[in-house]
Image (spheres, rainbow, N blue to C red):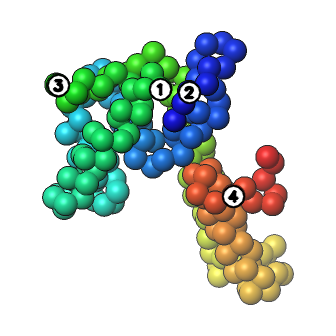
Amino acid sequence: MSTHADPDGGLAESDIFHILGNDRRREILSVLAAEEGRLAVSDIAQTVAAREAATDDSVPNNLYKSVYVSLQQTHLPQLEADGIVVYDTDAKTIQPGPHFDRVRMHIDESNALATTALHATIALSLGGLALVTLSVLGAPLVTRVPPISLASLALALVAVGGGVAVAADGSLPALPFRER
C-alpha cells in the first residue's frame, strides 16, 4: 500500500481506514496500544491467535504459526512501511512508530464506542426485564398492557441494544435509525 500524507504531514484518513480494515493489523495495534513500548512478535502473535480462537486457554499450534508467519511476512512490514510501527526483524520486536498516535486515536475511539454500546445493551435488556417482572408482580400501570405487548417490547429493547453494539463494532452497516 502506498501512503498518502494528509495536510498535517501524517497518514491520510483513507490509509488509516485501510490499515484498520484488517482484523490482524487492528489486533496488533490494539495490543501495542495497550502495552506500550517494545513488544516481542511472538507475544503479539500469541495474543492475536488467542483472540481469533476466542480462548484464554492454549491456542492451537497451527493457528499460532499461521498468525506468526502472517505478521512477519505481511502485516508488520506494511505497518513499518506506513510508519506506524518500528519493526526490528533481527530482534523480532516492534514498537510504536512516528504515525502510531494518529492510528491509535482511531483505536481508542472505537474501543470507547464499543464500551458505550455494551452499556446501552445491558441497560436496554435490564429495562425489558424490569417491564416483564413488573407485569408478573402485578404492578398497576404495567398490568393494563397485555403481557404479549410487554414481552414484545422487552424483546425489541434487547434487539435494539444488540443492533447498537453491532453498529459500534462496525461489523455491519449502520442501522437505518443511527445517525451517520
Residue bearing mark 3: 90
CB-based contact (under 8 Å), mark 4 and mark 3: no
Residue placed at 42% from the left, 41% from the top?
25
Q: Give the farthest residue toward the front.
A: 2
Q: Residues within 10 Å of mark 2 (few under 14, many from 20)?
A: some
Residue 23 appears in view: yes
CB-based contact (under 8 Å), mark 2 and mark 1: yes
Q: Amino acid at mark 1?
A: Asp
- Of the two numbered discs 4 and 3 on the same chain, state the one appearing first in sequence: 3
The secondary element bearing badge 1 is classed as loop
Q: Where residue 173 is drawn, which disc sits there?
A: 4
Residue bearing mark 1: 82
Q: Is residue 75 depicted above or below 171 in this figure?
A: above
Query: Observer-nearest residue: 80 or 50?
Result: 80
Number of marks: 4
CA separation in Å, label 2 and label 1: 6 Å
- Give the side of residue 172 with respect to residue 146, left or right: left
